[in-house]
């Protein structure tokens, strides 16, 4: 069970009112999506802590940067994300705690969660949907099973599934190592 005390240990610099806002949703959706033991929670919170900047960013900051311009058609990355219309890169930028990105992923999340994220992308920035979409995405991509392996190699594999590479890996790894202590895995 996710409590305010656990969240305080996971996100020590986050204000109490924000932790309370998120606690109910973490409690509900971590259980529903079986992110419910110490190995899974340490890995999950390390990854979303990095992706969201400790619950600060529910949407990717849009430059656009050179990388973000690759989200726009006619690039290969845009095609793989299902971005078919002009402006889809920005419209379907990373949102939620795990930064779901691209029209195809928004469509998949919309169908799975019965919420119109394609028509209303900003819904993924609300705490309920930010948490639910991250938990759903995590379970749907088999990350619980990878977290169960509980090695640095498995954590690296998770990072690649989430990010498509190893962007921010030193921070992700440092978070995971700290959370392994919080969740008493050492």
Image (cartoon, rainbow, N blue to C red):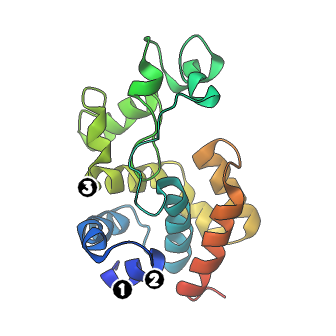
Q: Are marks 2 and 1 in contact (CB under 8 Å)?
A: yes
When asked about the image quadrant of residue 95, the answer is top left
Q: Secondary structure at mark 3?
A: helix
What is the crowding at mark 3: few (fewer than 14 residues within 10 Å), some, or many (at least 20)?
Answer: some
Question: Which of these two is toward me, 125 or 104?
Answer: 125
Residue holding disc 3? 128
Q: Quadrant of the N terminus?
A: bottom left
When asked about the image quadrant of residue 70, the answer is top right
What is the crowding at mark 2: few (fewer than 14 residues within 10 Å), some, or many (at least 20)?
Answer: some
When asked about the image quadrant of residue 36, the answer is bottom left
Can I make out residue 103 in this image?
no
- Residue beneath the point at 42% across and 53% down: 97
Looking at the picture, how far across and down is residue 129, in whole percent? 29, 50
- Residue beneath the point at 55% across and 53% down: 142
Looking at the picture, how far across and down is residue 103, in whole percent? 42, 26
Residue holding disc 1? 5
Task: Note whether 185 is above or below 17 in the view shown.
Answer: below
Which numbered disc, 2 or 3, marks the residue that appears first in the sequence?
2
> Can you tell which mark lies on residue 9?
2
- Residue beneath the point at 51% across and 64% down: 44
Question: Which of these two is toward me, 51 or 34?
Answer: 51
């Amino acid at each position: 069970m996710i409590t305010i005390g656990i969240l305080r240990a996971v996100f020590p610099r986050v204000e109490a009112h924000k932790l309370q806002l998120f606690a109910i949703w973490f409690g509900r959706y971590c259980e529903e999506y079986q992110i419910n033991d110490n190995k899974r929670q340490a890995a999950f919170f390390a990854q979303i802590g990095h992706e969201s900047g400790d619950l600060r960013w529910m949407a990717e900051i849009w430059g656009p940067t050179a990388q973000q311009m690759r989200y726009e058609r006619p690039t290969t990355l845009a095609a793989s994300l299902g971005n078919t219309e002009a402006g889809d890169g920005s419209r379907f930028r990373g949102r939620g705690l795990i930064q779901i990105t691209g029209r195809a992923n928004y469509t998949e999340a919309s169908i799975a969660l019965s919420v119109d994220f394609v028509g209303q992308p900003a819904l993924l920035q609300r705490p309920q949907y930010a948490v639910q979409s991250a938990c759903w995405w995590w379970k749907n991509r088999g990350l619980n099973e990878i977290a169960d392996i509980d090695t640095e190699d498995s954590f690296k594999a998770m990072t690649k599934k989430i990010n498509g590479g190893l962007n921010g890996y030193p921070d992700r790894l440092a978070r995971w190592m700290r959370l392994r202590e919080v969740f008493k895995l050492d």
